[in-house]
Image: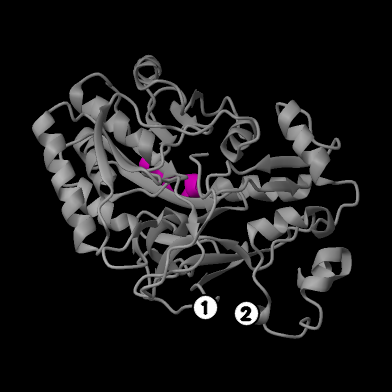
Amino acid sequence: MREFAVTHSAFYRVFHRGLQQRPLQHLPILTKATLMERFDELVTARDVRLADAEAYLRNEDGSRPFRDQYVVMSTSGSTGRRGVFVLSPREWTRALASITRPIGWVRQAVKTGKGAPRSALIASSAPWHYSARVGRALATSIVPTLRLDAAMPIDAMVARLNEWQPVSMATYPSVLRELAAAQCAGALKIQLQVIASSAEVLTAETRAAVRRAWGDITLQDTYGATEYAPIATECMHGRKHLFEDGAIIEVADDEGRVLPPGEMGTRLLLTVFERHTQPLIRYEISDRVRLTGEQCPCGRPFRVIESIEGRQEDVLYFDHAAAGLVAVHPNRFHDTLERFAVTAWQVVHDDRVLTVRLLGAHDAALRAAVEREVRAMLASAGAQTPHIEILAVDQLERGATGKAPLILSRRPWPVRDQVGTGGDAHWVGPRVTPE
């Protein structure tokens, strides 16, 4: 892949100049910003240009290939900038083959009766999104599937699922948690055997909500990205294995140092095999991941992820109580908010206010308790407490793909980590929009 990229990509010819014989870890890291800024030089297909690909994404529904052969998809832009990715027919076939592997890992958990088992897929219907393209490509009468847009109102979703009665379901964790609450309340009445979760961090509280709703069923979480999916998925032992036969996957820190098992990285680096149209070599995904050195009883040779803590962009920055800035990790919000009996929560941070939106929190005393706990948590982190609003809502804010991120930051990025520096806060932005 490295030799091909240097030979056929004007970008890589410069980016890797003089490094052809060096180990992979000596190569520079490719960011999404660089990939998009140098798109036309990076791709190896001379008939592919960014302006044309973006026009295709704006005007086409995905039923006709780009340039009569390529599959073009984009990310939602939830980390601040959208990424556009182009796959040849062979690359797309390999991607579809990879995405079916998690299904095979849990297929034995589905007990079939008369007729084909029904499934439900609740995800984005946007034609430029990965899940919509995969859903269309893998549609088959062998497994009758109800496809719902994750952005549709929860009541309408519940009604359709009650009519369809699936035995397996795939969706985002934010949707899953609301459906689990509806099942416990008696509004949703489906008997699931297998649930597949992806595209967002699956929290311990959401897992617990699924157990309350459907008992001890198979819940398989898959970790992936438009750039490479799946990156990892859970086996029947609940261990999340990296798919290392399709890419070299490195867990790295802020300085790009590759970390051993047990250390939390701040970014994941992907070198994807056999992606010749748009080579991705040491491509950065800003997810916080830690590996474990333990072997899994399932016998698979792939390394195992111990934890995924979401994107580095989900870390919120507050003015320090003394000087500079203090970073507050999303886990602190998880630890604080998941102690309360609410259906779901969402934190929105901007320069003016920190808003906590709560589903199922109509009791004013509960909302007051949430505010006290959030204030105490921020104070313990050394943050200067901002204005806090606790809102009871009927629906969380969702982006274009139907996802409801737990953390939304609309405050600009700090230029550098100033925790403990005593320096003035400098910001660049805007930072992150929902999607």
- Rendered residue at 54%/61% (across/down): 243
Q: Is residue 29 left or right of residue 310?
A: right
Q: Is residue 177 above or below residue 362?
A: below
Task: Provide residue 174's location: percent of width, then percent of height.
Answer: 37, 37
User: Does the rendering let one see residue 110?
Assistant: no
Q: Which residue is mark 2?
A: 25
Q: 414 or 72, which is in the foreground?
A: 414
Tag 1 near tag 2, CB within 8 Å: yes
| Label 1 or label 2, whichever comes before in sequence order | 2
User: Does the rendering let one see residue 215?
Assistant: yes
Mark 1 residue type: Val
- Rendered residue at 46%/69% (across/down): 303
| Screen quadrant of the N terminus | bottom right
Task: Provide residue 238's location: percent of width, then percent of height.
Answer: 34, 56
Q: Which residue is mark 1?
A: 258
Q: Is residue 424 left or right of residue 415?
A: left
**Which span of residues is magenta-colored?**
102-109
Main secondary-structure element of the magenta-colored stretch: helix
- Rendered residue at 73%/50% (across/down): 91
For the view shown, which residue lies furthest in the right direction? Answer: 46
- Residue density around tag 1, few if under 14, some if 14–19, many if 20 or more, within 10 Å: some
Mark 2 residue type: Gln
Task: Provide residue 148's location: percent of width, then percent of height.
Answer: 48, 24
User: Is residue 108 magenta-colored?
Assistant: yes
Q: Is residue 224 left or right of residue 364?
A: right
Q: 371 or 11, which is in the foreground?
A: 371
Task: Provide residue 270's location: percent of width, then percent of height.
Answer: 60, 64
**Residues under labels 1 and 2: Cα distance?**
8 Å
